[in-house]
């Protein structure tokens, strides 16, 4: 996982625990559910880096359940 991507994504998703969960779910989608990346890249990126780039570029969003908002 690229440290710079992690720092940038952490500016978008402030809570590190939520960031980990969002990245983890997206990696699962990319690796096991056959979903395609939402970002274009000329270099070969690990699924974790793809997920982080998607968050950084605003192409991946998430919603918190109501019970976590209180």
Image (cartoon, helix red, strand yellow):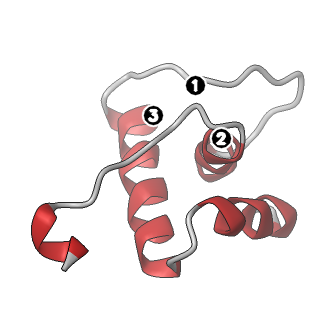
- Which residue, given by chain and number where applicable, does mark 2 sit on? 50
Image spot of residue 24 (x, y percent): 42, 58
Determine whether label 1 and label 3 are within 8 Å by CB. Answer: yes
Q: Which quadrant: the N terminus?
A: bottom right
Determine whether label 1 and label 2 are within 8 Å by CB. Answer: yes
Residue extending farthest front: 70
Image spot of residue 17 (x, y percent): 43, 79
Disc sitting over residue 69 in the figure:
none
**N-terminal-most mark, 1 or 2:** 1
Label 2: how many Cα within 10 Å (few below 14, some 14–19, many 20+) = many
Residue at the image position 76 percent from the left and 20 percent from the top: 40
Q: Quadrant of residue 13?
A: bottom right
- Which residue, given by chain and number where applicable, does mark 1 sit on? 37
Is 3 positioned to the left or the right of 14 in the image? right
Residue 10 against residue 64 in the figure, above or below: below
SS under mark 3 = helix
Determine whether label 2 and label 3 are within 8 Å by CB. Answer: yes
Image spot of residue 41 (x, y percent): 82, 24
Residue at the image position 65 percent from the left and 51 percent from the top: 52
Residue 20 against residue 48 in the figure, above or below: below
Is 43 positioned to the left or the right of 10 in the image? right
Disc sitting over residue 30 in the figure:
3
Label 1: how many Cα within 10 Å (few below 14, some 14–19, many 20+) = some
Residue at the image position 51 percent from the left and 37 percent from the top: 60
SS under mark 2 = helix
Is 68 positioned to the left or the right of 31 in the image? left
SS under mark 1 = loop
Residue 29 against residue 8 in the figure, above or below: above
Is 69 positioned to the left or the right of 20 in the image? left
């Amino acid at each position: 996982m690229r440290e710079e991507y992690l720092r940038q994504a952490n500016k978008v998703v402030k809570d590190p625990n939520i960031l980990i969960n969002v990245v983890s779910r997206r990696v699962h989608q990319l690796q096991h559910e056959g979903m395609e990346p939402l970002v274009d890249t000329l270099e070969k990126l690990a699924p974790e880096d793809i997920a982080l780039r998607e968050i950084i570029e605003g192409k991946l969003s998430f919603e918190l359940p109501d019970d976590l908002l209180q």
